[in-house]
Image (cartoon, rainbow, N blue to C red):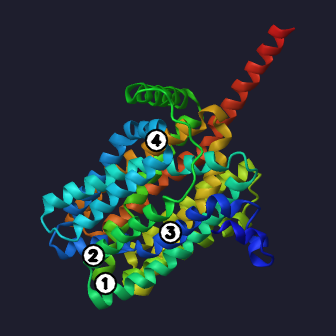
Amino acid sequence: MFSGLEEIGGWGMSFFKKNELKYLWPFYIDALISPMLFFAPAFYVIYLLGLDFSVFQIGILFTVSFLVAFVFEIPTGSIADLYGRKTSVLFGYFIESVGFLSLFFISNYYYFLFAFALIGFGSTFSSGAKEAWIVDLVKKRKGLSNEYFTKSQSFDATGLVISGILGAFIVSVFGLSLIWMFAFVSFLISISVLSFAKEDYVRKKSSFRDSYKRVKKQTGISLRFGAKHPVLFWFFIAGFTLAFAITFNEGIAWTPFLEGLGFPDYAFGYLWSAIAVVYAVSPWVSKKLLKVHSEKNQRNFISGAILIAALTTILVLFANSLSFVLFISIFTLFAYSSIGPVERSYFHRFIPSKMRATIGSVEGMILSLGVILATPLVGLFVDVIGARYTIFLGGVLLFPAAIIYYRIKDFEKKEHLKIGREEKVSEEVGS
């Protein structure tokens, strides 16, 4: 159907590589279309506040979703290992779609707890499995995986920009409750489109128990490796600290703060579009500001960007105009998102290739733990001391993260000395 585009001259020929659309067209359509309808996150907190839930209760809802995802990350990873990535991803999307659909019909807080838990559970089936599905599919086609990650991010960002504008229109005309129905349809589109995608998978002849033991063992090895590694250990600490602090500067605190300054409900859709633009542009700006091959510059850029975000966030204590508050929100978001590509490049320098996937999963679990611990605290602080001071506290908490990232250079020196000694001993033994 779409593979023929590559044989046509002009734009299609120059933009897509040979056989790229043949294998990846469902993933590209999914990356573009599904985000357009998934504007629910822009209005989560507004909708829940409208049900008279306290901010602490809202924090608990998100915490339950994160916690369930954290607990089931490893067991559900075994499903993809046994039955294939495609099966795992589509099944996970189905569970999430049911969770979002149920939110349209309920108002009881305890039902919301169950629905958010269901969404968190469903997300674990696609977490990691979708990327593995794509990488396995194109691993024999040189360069296609890099093409996918670059283009899918662009398509996704484009879809998110449109989703915010569409969401603002839907909410202003039809009300907030439809956000859940559109989220449900978004997942249905993903399931429908991705069902046409190919998969390069041979079922393993093992039981769920054996697969679970294998994944658990690999995770344990990666945890021990990271704990003993003088650089990765502090990278994990820094990442946990950063995730904990950033949670204080997300929607749970910012939504009631902006609402208190007269920001209309539907306008959160436009803010969502602005956020998508920031996420799309910031990596390219940081690339221009930094020579990525310079290891020293990478580390300094990370700690410097966090420091700038901290100082900017603290200004919220003195901000009273809506325009200034929006500037603080967007600028700090720009600082956070500019860190990502640089931090990923720097982080992977210290990971052996054969342990890359499992150490990445371990890091994800550590970051999730930071969010899980911070989220209910954010809700509690907003209720007790107010959104302004909660956001200010998040800015203060960023300073330790900036310091740890900057100090990694000292631990890195120790690691290089250790490697040098090991190589010297190896040479002496060999001679």
- Residue occupying the point 46% across, 70% down: 34
Residue marked by disc 3 = 333
Q: Nearer the viewer, residue 58 or 247?
A: 58
Coordinates of residue 419 in the picture (x, y in percent)? 72, 25
For label 1, the crowd category at 10 Å Cα-Cα, with few meaning under 14, some 14 to 19 and many 20 or more, is some
Q: Image quadrant of residue 174? A: bottom left
| Circle on res. 46 | 2
Label 1, label 4: how many angstroms apart (C-alpha)?
A: 40 Å
**Vertical placement of residue 157 versus 264, above or below:** above
Numbered disc in front, either 3 or 4: 4
Label 3: how many Cα within 10 Å (few below 14, some 14–19, many 20+): many
Q: Nearer the viewer, mark 4 or mark 2?
A: 4
Quadrant for the C terminus in the image: top right
Q: Residue at x 76, y 50 (%)?
A: 142
Amino acid on which the number 4 mark rests in the picture? Ala
Q: Where does label 4 land, which residue?
A: 80
